[in-house]
């Protein structure tokens, strides 16, 4: 089988597009990881304001207490997941750069 875009690196034969993907992960992967981590931190910082807003909506009768609890729990879980995802992407990219 003929692959016109084959390059030789220090390791095994790689298709050219795979070499380009790893180069993109070097630059954009770090930026994506930082943005994900910052988004998680921002969500965590917004959580107390959101909790107060949902408490006000419960007092006004716009939300039930169960709905408010679900919203607050979702924001807490999503902020943690986004932060950990950013850290995981950063570790993956740094591990890829180290090799």
Image (tube, grey):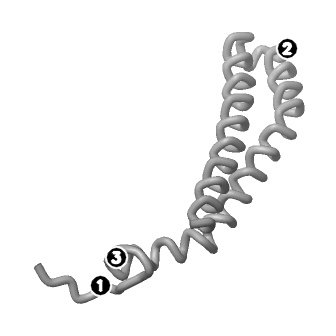
Viewer-nearest of discs 1 and 2: 1
Which quarter of the picture shows residue 34?
bottom right
Residue at the limit of the structure toward the left, as seen here: 1
Q: Residue at x 74, y 50 (%)?
A: 37
Residue that numbered label 3 is attached to: 14
Q: Is residue 46 above or below residue 86?
A: above
Residue at the limit of the structure toward the front, as seen here: 10
Q: In what element is the residue under mark 3? A: strand
What percent of the width, then of the height, locates residue 85? Answer: 63, 45
* CA–CA distance in space, label 3 to label 1: 6 Å
Residue that numbered label 1 is attached to: 6
Location of the N terminus (image quadrant)? bottom left
Q: Residue at x 44, y 80 (%)?
A: 10
Q: Is residue 76 above or below residue 87?
A: above
Q: Residue at x 41, y 75 (%)?
A: 11
Location of the C terminus (image quadrant)? bottom right
Q: In what element is the residue under mark 2? A: helix
- 92 displayed left or right of 80: left
What percent of the width, then of the height, locates residue 24? Answer: 54, 74
In front: 32, or 65?
A: 32
Q: In what element is the residue under mark 1? A: strand
Q: Determine contact: label 3, label 1, CB under 8 Å.
A: yes
Specify the label residue 59 is tagged with: 2
Labels 1 and 2: the sequence-earlier one: 1
Labels 2 and 3: the sequence-earlier one: 3
In front: 22, or 85?
A: 22
Q: Residues within 10 Å of mark 2 (few under 14, many from 20)?
A: few
Specify the label residue 77 is tagged with: none
What percent of the width, then of the height, locates residue 42? Answer: 81, 46
* CA–CA distance in space, label 1 to label 2: 65 Å
């Amino acid at each position: 089988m003929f692959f016109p875009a084959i390059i030789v690196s220090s390791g095994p034969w790689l298709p050219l597009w795979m070499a380009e993907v790893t180069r993109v992960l070097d630059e954009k992967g770090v930026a994506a990881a930082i943005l994900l981590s910052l988004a998680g931190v921002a969500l965590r910082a917004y959580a107390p304001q959101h909790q107060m807003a949902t408490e006000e909506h419960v007092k006004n009768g716009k939300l039930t207490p169960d709905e408010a609890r679900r919203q607050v729990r979702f924001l807490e879980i999503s902020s943690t997941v986004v932060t950990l995802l950013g850290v995981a992407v950063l570790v993956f990219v740094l591990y890829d750069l180290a090799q």
